[in-house]
Image (cartoon, rainbow, N blue to C red):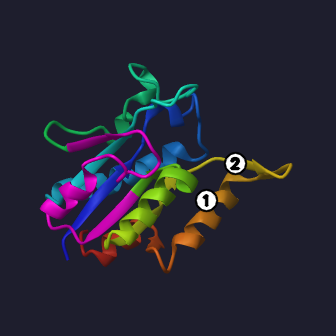
């Protein structure tokens, strides 16, 4: 089964000092970098997704800022596919679906940020479009959320969204487990 790695929004604004710092962003990016290195070495397809804010009032991922740039840990190499998006779902108004279909991709490995937003939206869309999905749980990061006057810890947000995806929409597993399952390392 032909597999591609999709790296979603691993951008500077999500790291310490950025405008929307996530918990565990550095560790998640390092795991994503390990998968990226393995995919590169195996010459497997990969796609970098970069979010550019276009919504009025946006406070991060603003065009022409350092925060919008892909983090150095997973920076694309010359010739690697990069798609820009403006919505949480990496397929919405991007050439991602056509690209994956042209490459005859059947399965995607998804890493990135934020688990509860862009990762979730992209995994659900990928499943609905017929792709088998593997989510590298330790190569994703998120933040605490507040609802109904209660704060939900980032760790709990992360686990809840992975639990919701795991099973129907895909398989949530560690990066190392994905490498083993795909017989890459």
**Quick one: label 2 or label 1, which is nearer the N terminus?**
2
- Provide residue 169's location: percent of width, then percent of height: 46, 74
List the single residue furthest toward the right.
149
Q: Is residue 139 visible?
A: no
Q: Is residue 115 visible?
A: yes
Quadrant assignment, res 5:
bottom left
Marks 2 and 1 sit apart, C-alpha to C-alpha, by 9 Å
Mark 1 lies on residue: 158
In this image, 114 relative to 82: left or right? right
Verify CB contact (< 8 Å) between mark 2 and mark 1: no
- Provide residue 162's location: percent of width, then percent of height: 56, 67
- Provide residue 155's location: percent of width, then percent of height: 66, 57
Reply above or below: 170 against 76.
Answer: below
Reply above or below: 61 against 83.
Answer: above
Secondary element under disc 1, as helix, strand or loop, is helix
Is residue 6 or residue 77 the one in the foreground? 6
Q: Residue at x 67, y 52 (%)?
A: 154
Mark 2 lies on residue: 144
Magenta span of residues: 81-110
> On residue 84, which mark appears?
none
- Provide residue 148's location: percent of width, then percent of height: 84, 52
Q: Residue at x 41, y 63 (%)?
A: 125
């Amino acid at each position: 089964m032909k597999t591609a790695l999709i790296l979603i929004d691993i951008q500077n604004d999500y790291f310490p000092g950025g405008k929307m710092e996530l918990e565990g962003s550095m560790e998640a990016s390092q795991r994503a970098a390990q998968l990226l290195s393995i995919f590169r070495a195996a010459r497997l397809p990969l796609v970098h997704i970069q979010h550019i804010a276009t919504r009025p009032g946006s406070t991060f991922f603003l065009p022409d800022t350092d925060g919008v740039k892909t983090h150095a840990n997973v920076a694309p190499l010359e010739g690697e596919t990069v798609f820009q998006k403006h919505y949480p779902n990496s397929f919405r108004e991007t050439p991602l679906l056509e690209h994956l279909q042209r490459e005859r991709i059947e399965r995607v490995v998804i890493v990135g940020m934020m688990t509860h937003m862009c990762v979730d939206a992209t995994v659900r869309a990928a499943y609905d479009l017929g792709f088998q999905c593997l989510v590298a749980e330790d190569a994703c990061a998120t933040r605490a959320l507040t609802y109904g006057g209660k704060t939900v810890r980032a760790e709990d947000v992360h686990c809840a969204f992975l639990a919701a995806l795991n099973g129907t929409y895909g398989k949530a597993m560690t990066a190392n487990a994905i490498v083993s399952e795909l017989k890459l390392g």
